[in-house]
Image (tube, rainbow, N blue to C red):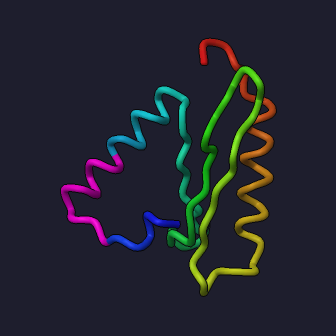
Amino acid sequence: MPWAETILTIEASESNIRQARLQCLERTDLRLLLILKKTGQIVGSSGLHRIDWHSRKFEIGYWVRTSCAKQGYVTEAVRAITHFAIQEPSKSY
């Protein structure tokens, strides 16, 4: 994960999040956070990348905090994301 090697400035972080939002609205990349329901703590991130809605080809990427690994969070997220990718209508994408 080359992006993990760089600490972004506040301005660069804001730009990155704005770009992610635009990609989400365009349905070209869907970045998601893994958040504990009980505490609201961010434990990781996942999403659909390299999206081809017409062929239904996707890449699922993820990362999780070391302290939260092997607790089923990524498994739960990947199942939900896979379900979304299969069920989401491809109209206008």
The magenta-colored residue range is: 7-17
- Name the residue at the top extreme: 92
Q: Residue at x 80, y 41 (%)?
A: 83
Q: Quadrant of the C terminus?
A: top right
> x%, y% of residue 4?
44, 70
Residue in the image at 49% along x and 35% along y: 24
Asked if 52 appears above or below 67 in the picture, the reply is above
On whether residue 8 falls in the magenta region, the answer is yes
Q: Position of residue 18 (x, y in %)?
A: 32, 42
* Main SS, magenta residues: helix
Q: Residue at x 70, y 19 (%)?
A: 90
Task: Name the residue at 72% across, 46% down.
Answer: 81
Name of the residue lying farthest toward the bottom: 67
Farthest residue to the front: give it.
2
As drawn, is 53 to the left or to the right of 2?
right
Image spot of residue 35 (x, y percent): 56, 64
Q: How many marks?
A: 0
Left or right of 92, for residue 22? left
- 52 or 68, which is in the foreground? 52
